[in-house]
Amino acid sequence: MSTPVNAEQAWRDLQRIRVPQERVLDEAERSASGGPAAAYGTAALMWVFLAGLGLDLPRWGVWLAIAAYVALLGALAAGHHRRSRMRLHRTRCTWRMSAAFAAGGVAIAGVTLLSGGLVEPLGPPAAGLVQATVSTAAFLLFVGPAGRWATGSLRGDGEAATRQVAGR
Amino acid sequence: MSTPTGFDELIHPATRLSVVALLAATEWADFAFVRDSLSLSDSALSKQLHTLGEAGYLELRKEGGGRKRRTTVRLTDHGRAAFEGHVAALRAIVESAGPPPATGVAQPSTTEARQRQHGHAEAAR
């Protein structure tokens, strides 16, 4: 059986593969940076949750608040999933995306604990309100640059992966 | 010269190659996203997806209901393996012919590549 394509045609096919894969990277970047609603929604939930915890709730109230917070975050994530047009394949995800997620968790938890300790003398509910506001502000300040940093690497690494697939 | 191992006649046509290449970069993709990204009509894309689906290369899933109903497409493990094999075969063909051609095709800019792809997609309709 003879080769169905010559070398030049095979080369063009390899280059052709890059185009749709770049569209995927475009969409991944767009969906990562294009939706302030998700960040503000998450921040609003966070503020209400932390302010609620600052009201010196009984144990059952704390568990109820945690359950409601997790359920609402889940609903927010489900809504985001429904609006998404695609999900990047796991092989295209970069270490920066995981690092940004982990660093975000550590940074926000750190700010929350630190601010909680600093405002403790104020007593409820003022301490809870200040802690919630500071933590939410830290989240909003972090989420934009971290998202851009993570998706910025996506294009570089993604193109490298695509070139590797295409034999470059 | 023999056909390199992994060369896939089903994936080889340009439109199908583009569809599979796009899906290979995703866990799943919305039908409308694939259609818009490749500048295909609904019917042209449906035809290609049907062919690939019959070969077990991809799965179509319908989600939601009413006006929010949408179709998502996912490359199966079989389809992903076939795509990787086909790409390896194309590389083998290129490598067997020596260094890549020193033409504009070798390093197309994104814009050039998109224009070429758009033209190709139009022709495939």
Image (cartoon, coloured by chain):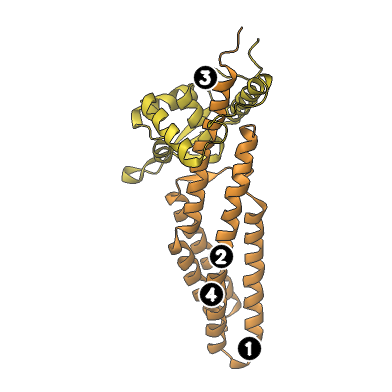
Gap between marks 2 and 4 measured at Cα? 15 Å
Chain letter for the yellow part: B
- Whether residue A55 can be seen here: no
Q: Residue furthest bottom?
A: A121
Label annotation for residue B10: 3
Gap between marks 3 and 2 measured at Cα? 43 Å
Per the image, the residue denoted by label 2 is A145
Query: Which structural element holds mark 3?
Result: loop
Residue A101: image location, x then y, percent: 62, 60
* Quadrant of the image containing the C terminus of chain B: top left
For the residue carrying disc 4, how many other residues have a C-alpha within 10 Å: few (<14), some (14-19), or many (20+)? many
B30 shown above or below B101: below
Q: Are marks 2 and 1 in contact (CB under 8 Å)?
A: no
Circle 2 marks a residue in which chain?
A
Per the image, the residue denoted by label 1 is A120
Q: Amino acid at mark 4?
A: Thr
For the residue carrying disc 1, how many other residues have a C-alpha within 10 Å: few (<14), some (14-19), or many (20+)? some
Q: Amino acid at mark 3?
A: Leu
Of the residues under marks 2 and 1, which one precedes in the sequence? 1
Q: Amino acid at mark 2?
A: Pro
Q: Residue at x 63, y 40 (%)?
A: A161
Q: Are marks 2 and 4 in contact (CB under 8 Å)?
A: no
Tell us which disc is closer to us: 2 or 1: 2
Circle 3 marks a residue in which chain?
B
Which residue is more in the foreground, B61 or A25?
A: A25
B40 shown above or below A25: above
Per the image, the residue denoted by label 4 is A136
